[in-house]
Amino acid sequence: MERKGVETIKEASKRFPETMDMFTNNVFSTERVIQAPPLDLPDFLKPNTRLKMDGLKCLSHVPNESVPVAFFDPQYRGVLDKMNYGNEGKSREKRRCALRQMTEELIGKFIQGINNVLNPSGHLFLWIDKFHLCQGFGTWIDGTQLDVVDLIVWDKERFGMGYRSRRVSEYCMVLQKQPRRAKGVWKIHNIRDVWRERTDTKEHPHQKPLKLQAELIAAVSNEGDYVIDPAAGSFSVMYAAHMQNRHFIGCDLEG
Ligand SMILES: C[S@@+](CC[C@H](N)C(=O)[O-])C[C@H]1O[C@@H](n2cnc3c(N)ncnc32)[C@H](O)[C@@H]1O
């Protein structure tokens, strides 16, 4: 966020035009040189709607190398199984356990599908929890062209569970399809890597932060581009895409 009354380097450089080059020619450029190709979708894959369908089917109908940005927030059992919180099925976990769970193999297939539809140098924002952050999720991206390029910690401002420390965070892993580059691709440079935002979990227990997702979309796409989310839950990514004048294609088994 730019502070009021403080001249940014970019503003200062306007007084010295010969230095403007550094903003188009270096990694802090606010320009995007990548243009997404026009998208040809089958009729049943209506953009900007809450589609009720299987995410793998949805991905299989999006042309390869056609979108600059995808989000994926898998519904995994990993933590419930391995950490045995012991409250599964009880009041506060009921809605979470009622959602369709994904196996590690299925998550790998989703990520492979996303890898296929992303443009070269396109981004996947992958939501993970503390368990996967610590134990790794490497098998999910085996055989793809995706590399980890950044990590954003989301402070949910909500007190969660935990036998030792209490969870207040989740993690947004930033992956980029090869070729890996920031210059001319990532155009917003003031997104904090610890992001505090409270969400309304009444609609969906896993709803992700709207404003953070909107900032990330603006950073790695142009107006009119498509954003994809094949397991969209509350469709927070669709609303974030619309905040930035982008189109959305996505679905959830529950609609
Ligand atoms: C963690 S939630 C996503 C939450 C979402 N990011 C949000 O902000 O609301 C994962 C979602 O995946 C959905 N899901 C599970 N298996 C699916 C599949 N095969 N295809 C599409 N959606 C699926 C579940 O119904 C659940 O709503």
Image (cartoon, rainbow, N blue to C red):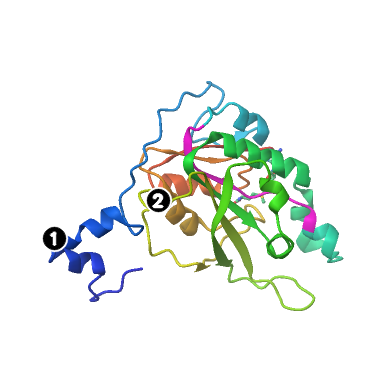
Name the image quarter holding residue 151. bottom right
Question: Does the magenta segment cover residue 69?
Answer: yes
Q: Decide: is 238 above or below 28.
A: above
Q: What segment is highlighted magenta in the picture?
A: 65-78
Mark 2 and mark 1 lie on one chain; the one further toward the N terminus is: 1
Q: Decide: is 218 above or below 120.
A: below
Q: Is residue 89 visible?
A: no
Q: Decide: is 127 above or below 250.
A: below
Quick one: 158 or 79, which is closer to the camera? Answer: 79
Disc 1 on helix, strand or loop?
A: helix
In the rendering, at what x and y percent does residue 220 appear? 42, 49
In the rendering, at what x and y percent does residue 6 appear? 25, 76
**Residue at mark 2:** 218
Label disc, if present, on residue 99 of the rendered structure:
none
In the rendering, at what x and y percent does residue 247 appear? 44, 38
Name the image quarter holding residue 158. bottom right
Q: In this image, 206 relative to 40: left or right?
A: right
Camera-side mark, 2 or 1: 1
The amino acid type found where label 1 is placed reads Pro
- Looking at the rendering, the quadrant in which ligand 1 lies is top right
Label disc, if present, on residue 17 of the rendered structure:
1
Residue depicted at 75% across the width and 51% down the height: 76
Q: In this image, 178 relative to 189: left or right?
A: right
CA gap, disc 2 and disc 1 = 26 Å
Disc 2 on helix, strand or loop?
A: helix
Q: In this image, 77 relative to 211: left or right?
A: right
Q: Decide: is 126 above or below 194.
A: above
**Callout 1: 10 Å neighbours few (<14), some, many (20+)?**
few
The N terminus: image quadrant: bottom left
The C terminus: image quadrant: top right
Question: Does the magenta segment cover residue 45?
Answer: no
